[in-house]
Structures are given as structure tokens and as C-alpha cells.
């Protein structure tokens, strides 16, 4: 979705979203179509959930999720 739609969807200011896009660490994933910035709604939802203060205070949950994803991709029986 274009940045203007993301502003309405997220209720985050355009200026703050632009800061998120340009962050050196963990920027908001996006693509540019010329000058137009596009962000997938599903990607934004996952990114903002991961960036919330509650998510950052629970790193073990992220590790568990990563382990589950790796097991799902490579089969649970793999060492």
C-alpha cells in the first residue's frame, strides 16, 4: 500500500513512517516504485508487532518462533 494509505491505516504520522523507513537498524521493509514508497500491509503488521516495546522485552518468544520456523522448513526430525 502507498505511504498515504499506510498513514490512515496505522494512524502513525507520515513523518514517523519515513523515519521508520530510513532507520539504520530494523527499518520498515518497503519497495520504491520510482518516488512512490510501497509497504505490504501484512509486512507492516508483522514489523510493527515486532517493534512494540512489549515484543522487545520478550526476546525468548522471538527465539522460540524462529526455532519453530526453522523446524517447519527443514522438518522437525532434523538435528
Image (cartoon, grey):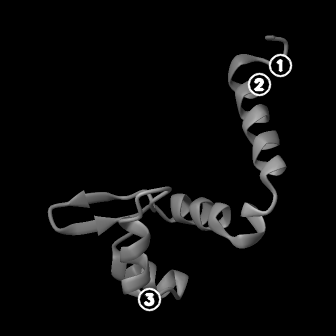
Mark 1 and mark 2 in contact? Answer it, CB < 8 Å.
yes
| Quarter containing the C terminus | top right
The residue under the point 82% across, 41% down is 64
Sequence-earlier tag: 3 or 1? 3
Mark 3 vs mark 1: in front: 3
Q: Secondary structure at mark 1?
A: loop
Image side of residue 66 versus residue 29, left or right: right
Q: Is residue 5 above or below residue 58?
A: below
**What is the distance, in whole Å, between disc 3 and disc 1 at their CAs?**
43 Å
Q: Earlier in the sequence, mark 1 or mark 2?
A: 2
On screen, residue 69 above or below 6? above
- Considering the numbered disc 2 on the image, is that residue within a helix, a strand or a loop? helix
- State which quarter of the image contains the N terminus: bottom left
Q: Name the disc covering residue 76, or none.
A: 1
- Residue under the point 79% across and 34% down: 68
The residue labelled by disc 2 is 71
The reply to whether dot 2 and dot 3 touch (C-beta < 8 Å) is no
Horizontal and vertical percent for residue 9? 51, 82
Q: Please identify the residue farthest to the left as the structure is shown.
A: 34
Q: Quadrant of residue 18?
A: bottom left
Q: Residues within 10 Å of mark 1 (few under 14, many from 20)?
A: few
Determine which residue is flagged by label 3: 13
Residue 37 is situated, as x and y percent measured from the top left of the image, at: 29, 67
Amino acid at each position: 500500500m502507498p505511504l498515504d494509505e499506510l498513514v490512515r491505516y496505522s494512524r502513525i504520522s507520515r513523518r514517523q513512517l519515513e523515519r521508520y523507513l530510513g532507520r539504520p537498524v530494523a527499518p520498515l521493509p518497503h519497495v520504491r516504485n520510482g518516488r512512490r514508497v510501497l509497504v505490504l500491509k501484512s509486512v507492516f503488521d508483522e514489523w510493527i508487532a515486532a517493534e512494540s516495546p512489549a515484543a522487545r522485552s520478550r526476546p525468548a518468544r522471538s527465539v522460540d518462533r524462529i526455532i519453530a520456523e526453522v523446524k517447519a522448513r527443514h522438518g522437525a526430525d532434523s538435528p
